[in-house]
Each structure stands twice: as C-alpha cells, then as structure tokens.
Image: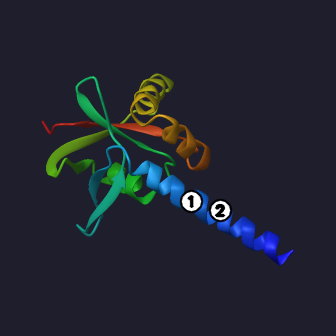
Amino acid sequence: MRRLLLGAVAALVSAGALTYWAGEQTEVVVLRTVDGAAGVHETKMWAVDHEGDPWVRVANPERAWYRRLLEQPSVELVRNGQAKRYTAEPHDTPEAAAAIDAAFREKYGLVDWWYGVLLRRHAIPVRLRPPQ
C-alpha cells in the first residue's frame, strides 16, 4: 500500500514538473500589473498576436493579476526583453474566446490543451492596446 501511494505521489510530481517544463518551451511573457498601493506585480504567462495586438488570457477570472488589471487597466508587457505599456481590454464574449483560443492552440499546441484540462475554468481573453 505504501509503495502504491509513493508511486502515485511521484507520478503527480513528475506530471507537474513535465507540465511546467512544457509550458516554458514556447514564448513566455511577463505582464506587470499594479495594485491599489502602487505595488507592481509580475506574472509569467503566454501571449499571442491577433488583429495587430498582443492578447493574453486568464484561465480563471478570480486570479489576482486579472483582478488588478480590472481595477487598473494600464499594464506593461515584457516580451523579448522589452517592456511596453498597454491598456488591457477584457473581451468576455464567445466570439473573442473562440478566436483567441484558436490562436493559442496554433502557437502552443498540445500544451495549451493540457493546461486547459488542468487549469482553465472560464478563460477570458484580454486584448492589450497601445495607450491612447
């Protein structure tokens, strides 16, 4: 029994490590958000380009970075070592979700599907637009 339990724990740890490693093999960006006390928070995530703008996607709208973005939509995206300012615009529509999900599938492949199985509950695409 103990051997079976140890095997299950080892399998879960291995699956988690492999998932993390696979997620780091394609472009990973950093989104900088600001909290109410002007503290800057950095969150690693994936990004795609669609209709001329970068897009990110929150897997669960209860995530802290997304909550900060809703309160303060001025963000920075660090991509290829360069930080650029954007205004974040969530697009919680079936049409936007379908288009952005397709872009993520095309770019990140099977790993995007696997992350979806593990983490995504109500994904919301977020368009990043240059500030006006």
Q: Residue at x 14, y 50 (%)?
A: 82
- Image location of residue 77, percent across then percent down: 23, 48
**Quarter of the image that includes the C terminus:** top left
For mark 2, what is the residue? 12
Q: Is residue 27 left or right of residue 14?
A: left
Quick one: 103 or 97, which is closer to the camera?
103
**Quarter of the image that includes the N terminus:** bottom right
Q: Secondary structure at mark 1?
A: helix
Q: Residue furthest right?
A: 1
Q: Is residue 111 left or right of residue 132?
A: right
Give residue 16's mark.
1
Amino acid identity at mark 1: Gly
Q: Is residue 65 above or below residue 93?
A: below
Spatial CA distance of label 1 from label 2 is 6 Å
Amino acid identity at mark 2: Leu
- Image location of residue 92, percent across then percent down: 45, 33
- Image location of residue 42, percent across then percent down: 29, 61
Q: Residue at x 53, y 46 (%)?
A: 115
- Image location of residue 109, percent across then percent down: 47, 34
Quick one: 45 or 4, which is closer to the camera?
4
Q: Do residues under tags 1 and 2 come within 8 Å of each other at their CB atoms?
A: yes
Q: Is residue 96 above or below residue 39?
A: above
